């Protein structure tokens, strides 16, 4: 029996440590935990937005403003916000799940093209495991939203958040992806790096305009 199945939650946190290699060795198909890591990366971001945003805005002392990409209902909670939140939570979870499915399908297609015999559902679990560090980007988005509405926004704070909560998790996830692919597929470093960079390069390119807009709009 795969020892990972006995304590999956504990090994979720191991992804944030130097024990990540052990996690990928234990999660090799056919013993890949899928449900818990997928639920983790789909539900925790919603909880982060729902809990942290009101706290951040309260600390800074600002209210939700027009033009913010963060829904005002998450910042200024009222009883009238309940219907919105009831809709927001499942829609956001489904949206995140779709992203996991698309990325898992990408790895599955690549695997088929290179005769890697790994089932689609195992790639789904793989995608969830490697994207655990990306939860930090949700914290970064919350902090950037607050920063954009501060009275005197600090450029040092802006770049610090980007480095710590955007760039670092992205690089971390790519490293995990390369490491996991090498363990799961026994392919060379060059192959794994190329396969890992493609989706996250596209993600970075799509994120840059939003960050530039946020930075220029607040200064």
Image (spheres, rainbow, N blue to C red):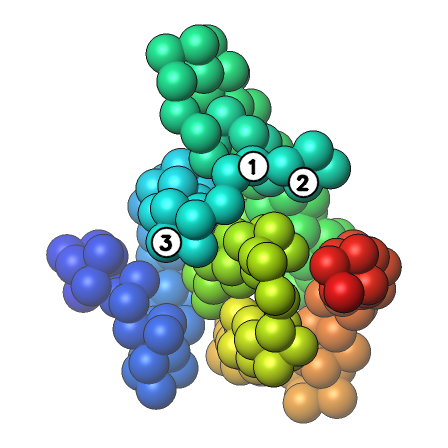
Q: Position of residue 124 (x, y in %)?
A: 53, 48
Q: Is mark 3 on a helix, strand or loop?
A: helix
Q: Is mark 2 on a helix, strand or loop?
A: loop
How far apart are the two marked residues, 2 and 1, measured between alpha carbons? 7 Å
Which residue is labeled 1 in the image? Answer: 64
How far apart are the two marked residues, 1 and 3, measured between alpha carbons? 13 Å
Residue 59 disc label: 3
Q: Which residue is farthest bottom?
A: 189
Q: Is residue 45 visible?
A: no
Identify which residue, 172 or 141, lies in the foreground. 141
Task: Please state, as top left, top right, bottom left or bottom right, where the N terminus lies in the image.
Answer: bottom left
- Contact, CB < 8 Å: mark 2 with mark 1? yes
How far apart are the two marked residues, 2 and 3, measured between alpha carbons? 18 Å
Q: Is mark 1 on a helix, strand or loop?
A: loop
Query: Of tags 2 and 3, which is closer to the observer?
Result: 3
3 versus 179 height, above or below: above
Q: In this view, does 46 lie to the left or right of 114?
A: left
Q: In this view, does 185 lie to the left or right of 47?
A: right
**Between discs 2 and 3, the one toward the N terminus:** 3
Which residue is labeled 2 in the image? Answer: 68
How packed mark 2 is, by other alpha carbons closer than 10 Å (few <14, some 14-19, many 20 or more), is few
Residue at image location 20% in from the left, 63% down from the top: 10
Q: Which residue is farthest left?
A: 6
């Amino acid at each position: 029996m795969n020892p990972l199945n006995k304590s999956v939650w504990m090994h979720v946190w191991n992804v944030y440590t130097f024990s990540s290699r052990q996690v990928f060795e234990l999660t090799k198909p056919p013993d890949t935990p899928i449900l818990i890591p997928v639920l983790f990366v789909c539900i925790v971001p919603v909880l982060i937005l729902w809990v942290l945003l009101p706290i951040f805005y309260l600390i800074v002392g600002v209210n939700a403003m027009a033009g913010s990409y963060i829904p005002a209902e998450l910042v200024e909670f009222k009883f009238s916000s309940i219907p919105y939140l009831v809709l927001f939570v499942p829609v956001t979870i489904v949206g995140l799940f779709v992203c996991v499915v698309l990325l898992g399908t990408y790895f599955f297609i690549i695997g088929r093209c290179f005769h890697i015999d790994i089932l689609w559902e195992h790639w789904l679990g793989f995608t969830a495991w490697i994207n655990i560090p990306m939860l930090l980007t949700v914290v970064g988005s919350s902090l950037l939203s607050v920063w954009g509405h501060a009275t005197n926004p600090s450029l040092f704070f802006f770049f610090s958040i980007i480095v710590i909560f955007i760039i670092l998790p992205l690089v971390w996830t790519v490293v995990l992806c390369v490491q996991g692919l090498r363990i799961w597929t026994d392919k060379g470093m060059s192959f794994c790096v190329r396969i890992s960079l493609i989706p996250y390069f596209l993600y970075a390119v799509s994120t840059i305009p939003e960050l530039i807009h946020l930075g220029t709009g607040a200064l």
